[in-house]
Structure formats: C-alpha cells, structure tokens
Amino acid sequence: MHPFLLTFQLASVTTLLLLPTGLAIAYWLTYGRSRWRPVVEVVVTLPLVLPPTVLGFYLLLAFSPESWFGGWLLRTFDVRLLFSFPGLVIGSWLYSLPFMVQPLRSGFEQLPRSLREAAWVLGKSPWQTFRKVLLPNLRPALLTACVLTFAHTVGEFGVVLMIGGNIPGVSRVASIAIYDEVESLNYSLAHQYSLILLLLSVAVLLVVYLINGRQKIVR
Amino acid sequence: MLSFDLMFRRDNFELVLANNSEEQPHNQSSFDYQSSKVGSLQRQSLPVTISEVKVTRGTITIVTGASGSGKTTLLRLLAGLETPTSGTIKDDDQIYYDAHTNLPPQQRDIGFVFQDYALFPHLSVEKNLRFALHDRQPDDIIHELLDTFELTNLKERKPPTLSGGQQQRVALARALVRQPKYLLLDEPLSALDSNLRRRLSSYLKSLVENRKMAIIMVSHDQEEMTKLADRVIELADGKVISDSPPNSSLRTESGTILQTKLDQDGTIELTIKIDTDQSTSRLKAGDRVLVVSKKEISSRN
C-alpha cells in the first residue's frame, strides 16, 4: 500500500477509536470527583511531554513476545502487535490521546453547569443529558479534537519507527517514507511527500478555523 | 407538603489581603521582598442551616435576603443539585433526602428555573419545551404553555436570539411542562417588563390555586412579596431570620415565626421558635414590642 494511503488509514482508525474513549475520559475528568483524577490527568498529558521514542521504546518492550504482555497476547489470541498495523493503532491511540482529550475537556468546561442540571431536573438521565444536551453543544470542540488527532497521527514518526519499523504496506507511513527517501538521497520524492503533507496540514487547519470562526459569529 | 431540615457546609478558600500598608511607608525606597506578603488563603465556610420549614401545596413562598445569604443554595439543596451535609427533605411521606436516601433530581417532583435560564441553545423554543415531556405525556400542554407565555410566534427561534425577558418566559414555561408539585424559581420575574410581570404573576397564582402547586421563589421585589407571596422567608448568613406572612409587619429578633394563624375574631396565633442561645425573643408589630420568653408562648393582641 502507498505510504499516504497507509497514513490516512492509520489516522482514520486512530481518530475513530479515540473519539468515544476520549469523550469518556474528558467527561470523567471534567465532572468526576474521583481522587484518581490527577493520575489519569498525568497519563493523558504524558504523551505531550515524553519524547515519542521513549513511548515507542516502552511499547516495543511491552509488545515483544518475550515480555509478559506480548507473550500473553501471542499465547492466548495468537496476536503479534510488534511490526503490525494493530500495534501501530494502539501506539497512535496513546500518542494522540492528549490531542483528543484536551479540546473535548475544555469544550465540556465551557458549557454552563446549569445546562446539565436543567436536563436532570427535567427528568433526563445522565446518559440522555450527555447525548441530547452536552454532545450537540460540544460540536466545535469535537471538530477541533478530531482534526487535531487526525493531523497529529499523520505526523507521527518516533513511535511508528520504534514499534512498526519500516515495512512497506504495513508500517511504512508517509513520515517514515520521507525519512527513508532522504536517507537514500532521493530528494525529489522526499520533496513530493513533504509538500503534500504540508499542504494537507494547512488545508485541514484552515477548514477547522473557518468552521469554528463562523460558528462564533452565528452565536 | 415539602418539609425540610437542613445543614449544608461548603468550604471555600478565599484570598484575604494582608493589611501591611503601615509597615511599608510610601517613601521607602528599597523594596523589601520579605515584608511584601500579599495575603493568605483562608478557609471560609458558608454553612446553610435551615431548621424545620414546611411548605404546603397551594402556597407561594418567597425567599429573600442579601446576596450570599444562601437563597440559591437552599433551592439547589431542595432540587437535589447539592447534597446536604445532614438533615432531611421530605415530600409528605416520600423521603427526598436523609441519612440513608438521596433521591437524584430526576426522581424529585420539583421544577426549577435557573437564574441564567439554562435554555438549551441548540434547540428551538418549542423543542426546549418538548424536551421536558415525559415518555408518554401528551403534547397538548406544549401548545397551551406556548400560548400562555406568548411564545407561539417565537417557537421556531433559538434561545440565543431571544431577549432576556423572552428567555425567562421560555424557562418558566419549560419548567411547567412536567407539572411538578413544587416549582423553585431563582429570581424568575426580574427580566420582565411590569405589564408582563403582572400577567405572569396572576398566572402563577392561578397555577398554585388550581393545580395545588407550591412555589418557592427567590425575590427581592417588595411588590412581588406583598402581592404574590403567602409567606416570606428571610435569610441571612445561611439562617432563617424571619418567616412570616408578607403583609404583617410582625418581625422577630432572635427568634423565628414558624406559623401564623388568623382566627375569624381577629386573634392571631403565633408559633415562635426562640433561638437556642437566647431565653427571650422580641416580637415587633409596628412600634409595639412584645418580649416573649421561652415559658410564655401564646399571646393575644
């Protein structure tokens, strides 16, 4: 598979998986009162601070068939995560977690508290309140979170290199392909790939800001 | 009848500015970092203690008091949006809150109008009202309420495009869709012009009389108190400082009027609760003062 197709596949799957999980985590972080909150906050923020190679290194250790986790996966489900697409998805899920959770969380925080309470007093369950009141009013934050997650996954490099390697069609995503072409002094192809990524990133961000900007004016 | 006996404490941290201006004369040229303490965080508790209040259906009770006296907190506690530290809340025999039970807001027969209206911005006026319908509740009430609150022309509009007064009407109408036994209103009529205010006041009054609803509302408006209320509860620092019918000029000091009964021969029977740390309560009626001691409770006037 072409590196770009693979990149978009990885970014789409990661975003789709991160959306429900990110929503749940952001909701819990905003409204929950558990004393474990700081711990989860650290886990969610860590990928922002940590060098991707560090994250990739630990995932490499965990996924390896010699490790407890990797061995268990292999024995029980016959699943090998190292140098595979599902392994990349798990790595990307973790790596892009803050980009999904943070915008959603600030989206939740910006909604007036009374909106949720009004729905409760009108007899709606927390789930109905989430679905019918919070989610529709979270639309700008949802868009921002999804686009940032997608774009961030497209730009992923260190984690993929560590746990995916450079296998064409499996783990050779666009960013790795660029690196690879530069290594083999194939600058013209590296140029092509880079330009496509650059233009794409600009276009995506432009769409987000245009849509969110228009919504602000309507309000 | 809604009866409650509540204690609620929330700790807030407040920055108290240090008063060290005297230690630092203006002409001091060198800035002494050591003595420039700005202030300190101090724990401020805002306890709300309400003892033995009973609200009967078919009445309008106005809760008044300075800002920060606990009016909104009281309404939030009753609706289940805030959990008391201790106490009980009962609707006749159904327990809303006690040491073992804490019914969520969904299960209390209470409507609430928020001070910021809390309208759903993504839904039209009509859909805001429809949102409140029970699963199998017929929707005639929606049209009736849209009509009563003069919202029929606005029913397709989204709340952010409405004026304050219009939003307030939508909020009030929405709270009435489920026809709750008790309706709690946090300054409900403040944004309305006097004409509409008068009409909605009489509508509320008729609701209370015809549907045997009880309304508890926060208000500062003297006219509302005298014209609308059957009873005015005044709070200060989270405590009831007076509880009396609005027209009476009866005021107590260091005590609370719990019940007032007017007989046909003009006798007023008062039940007064004297604060525990006091032995007497002073009852004022106009310029007359009656000192009531704990032994002698009933008095004729």
Image (tube, coloured by chain):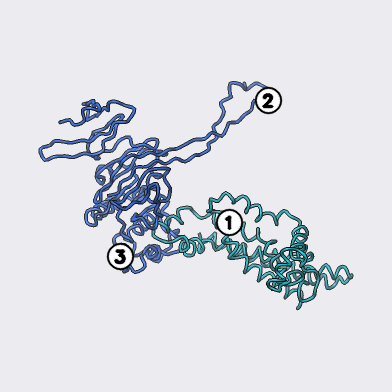
In the picture of the structure, the residue carrying the numbered disc 1 is A105
Cα distance in 3D space between marks 3 and 1: 37 Å
Q: Amino acid at mark 2?
A: Asp
Q: Position of residue B46 (x, y in %)?
A: 45, 37
Question: In which quadrant of the rendered view does residue A9 lie?
Answer: bottom right
Q: Are marks 2 and 1 on the same chain?
A: no
Q: Is residue A72 left or right of residue B4?
A: right
Closest to the observer: B107 or B140?
B107
Question: In which quadrant of the rendered view does residue B141 lie?
Answer: bottom left
Closest to the observer: A196 or A1?
A1
Disc ID at residue B148: none
Q: How would you rate the neighbour count of disc 1 (Cα within 10 Å): few for under 14, some for 14-19, many for 20 or more?
A: many
In the picture of the structure, the residue carrying the numbered disc 3 is B141
In the picture of the structure, the residue carrying the numbered disc 2 is B32
Q: Position of residue A102 (x, y in %)?
A: 62, 56
> Please, which chain is the residue tagged with disc 1 on?
A
Q: Which chain is cyan?
A: A
